[in-house]
Amino acid sequence: MTPFIEKMAGRAAAAPKRIAFPEAGNPNVLRTAQLAAAQGMGWPVLLGSPEQIEALARRYSVSTEKFSYFDYTSESRLRQLAGEYCAAFSDLSEKAVLRKAKDPLRCGLLLLKLHKVDCLAAGKDYATGDVVLNAISMIGLRPGVEAPSSIGIADIPGFSGGENGMLALADCAITVQPDARDLAGIAAASADTVRQLLGWEPRIALLGFSTCGSAEHASLEVIRQGVAMARELRPGIKIDGEFQLDAAILASTAAKKVTRESDVAGRANVLVFPNLHAGNIGVKLIQIFGKANAYGPILQGFAQPICDFSRSAPVDEMLGNVAMLVVRAGDSEARL
């Protein structure tokens, strides 16, 4: 277990939560749920037939002692769920709830909305788009949030910059081609996340292929406008750009390329990518060549806490995601 996971796990264990796992047919999801329970992070709620889940768990030597279940294959359980949902909310008919609840992800989101679980971890089998679109339609966004975004945390061996060798990376999962307003929203949400979750003082760099006007292109103007708008959204936060990656995280390069005063250049701990192509490629480069542990993507802006696993993530990274999810669930309760 990495020091980062140990820290997050300790915080999660101090305030454990009920965690929904819709993908109970995946062995690594079962392993992650077992470890989360064993370390006191919370109480896993597995969606599916208890008999089938326990048979799979036995096959992979996973203990189910601390698991509970919601059997979305049981007609009686679904009818009870539909009745409770329609008594609490008026947005869906009972027939619509029954139809949605036959899918484990949607069923888990219904349980989350009804506060029968405190948070939900998915994405190992479901694509990020499936998780995000279903969460938008069923859970919704926090007041004042216009669009969801994501942030990942990379723990990079041999890197001494950022925040003690760690960087927060956004948006690497949701917004394909952000405009200036989107970039500003991503920067603002990321500032909130790293402050609340990690206790960092954010230093946010908006990245591009130019540093402080060293090149000109219409796409760079979008980034510059995003910087200005982000500063308006979070006037007390250190936000700067546009920077090339090296100018953002390496003090020696920043000293050569950035000739004006900057609290971020060479010292950034949060990187905002110009689009999803750059973000997705950047994360995978760090993981493959930098041997980094990457935790996330952490979904930002939803009304309730949701985790989206990377489909390639090993169990230790998944466990880190769950620990952060539980911590965020506690923060969400504190804000209510």
Image (tube, helix red, strand yellow):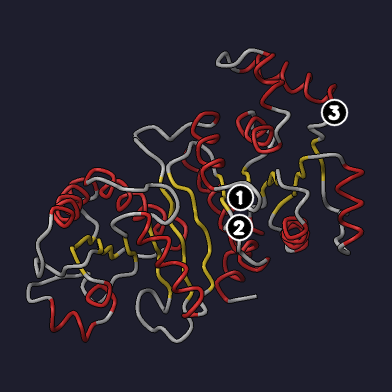
With 330 as the anchor, is 173 left or right in this view? left
Q: Which residue is identified by label 3?
A: 74
Q: Is residue 325 left or right of residue 71?
A: left
- Amino acid type of disc 2? Arg
Badge 1 element? loop
**Looking at the image, residue 128 lies above or below residue 40:** above
Of marks 3 and 2, which one's residue comes earlier in the chain?
3
**In front of the other: 137 or 215:** 215
Q: Observer-nearest residue: 125 or 41?
A: 125
Q: Where's residue 298, x and y in %?
A: 49, 53
Residue 240, labelled with which disc?
none
- The mark found on residue 123 in the picture is 1
**Which percent across, then down, holds residue 10?**
62, 65
Kindly indicate the quadrant of the structure image that contains residue 130.
top right
Residue at x 61%, y 50% (from the top left corner): 123
The residue where tag 2 is placed is: 311
Relative depth, front residue between 291 and 7: 291
Above or below, 247 against 219 in this view is below
Crowding near the residue tagged with mark 2, few <14, some 14–19, many ≥20 C-alpha atoms within 10 Å: some
Q: Amino acid at mark 3?
A: Ser
Residue 100, picture quadrant: top right
Q: Is residue 324 above or below residue 24?
A: below
Can you say whether 302 is above or below 266 in the image? above
- Helix, strand or loop at disc 2? loop
**Is there a contact, CB below 8 Å, between mark 2 and mark 1?**
yes
